[in-house]
Amino acid sequence: MQNAMRYMEEAERRSWLKSAANLAKLRVKLAEAWQSLGLSPQGANLVAKAYDPNLAARMHRDLARGKSDEEVAEMLQSAIRQKRYLEADQLLIDYERNRLRMGANHTAEVSR
């Protein structure tokens, strides 16, 4: 029984370390994306560091779906201006997911 408990604790620790490393990588990618959208490196890092997947999962709503690029850009700018960085991060993630999904759907349609 003790071995099983130690094994579970070790597995939980490894899982936590892996998720922390993945979060760090995600935040680096978010910072790069924000810089590509015109934020300074410092601003991009500030916004990216606000991303918390646990909080985002609770507030997650796909606000980018069905919106034009211009509408999403305005929503992103508004969230940044109002210092709603977690919302801005999630909106950017949702926008990119939708864009990739649409690209994949378009590629599938073309290859038929």
Image (cartoon, rainbow, N blue to C red):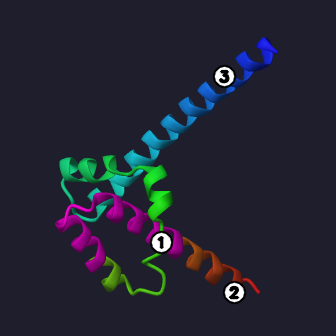
Q: Earlier in the sequence, mark 3 or mark 1?
A: 3
Q: Nearer the viewer, residue 35 or 59?
A: 59
Amino acid type for the residue under numbered disc 1? Arg
Task: Look at the picture and state if 35 lies above or below 7.
Answer: below
Quadrant holding the N terminus: top right
Question: In the structure shown, which secondary structural element does the residue marked by tag 2 occupy?
Answer: helix
Residue 32 pos. (x, y %): 34, 53
Q: Earlier in the sequence, mark 3 or mark 2?
A: 3
Disc 1 marks which residue? 61
Q: Any mark on residue 9, and which?
A: 3
> Is 97 covered by the magenta stretch?
yes
Residue 96 pos. (x, y %): 47, 69
Q: Earlier in the sequence, mark 2 or mark 1?
A: 1
Amino acid type for the residue under numbered disc 2? Glu
Disc 2 marks which residue? 109
- The residue sitting at 32% across, 84% down in the picture is 71
- The residue sitting at 43% across, 40% down in the picture is 24
What range is drawn magenta here? 74-99
Q: Nearer the viewer, residue 58 or 77?
A: 58
Q: In this rendering, would 53 be left or right of 85?
A: right
Q: Looking at this view, name the residue that lies furthest to the top.
A: 2
Amino acid type for the residue under numbered disc 3? Glu
Residue 75 pos. (x, y %): 29, 77
Q: In this rendering, would 73 be left or right of 8?
A: left
Quadrant holding the C terminus: bottom right
Question: So how many labels did they put on this image?
Answer: 3
* Spatial CA span between label 3 and label 2: 47 Å
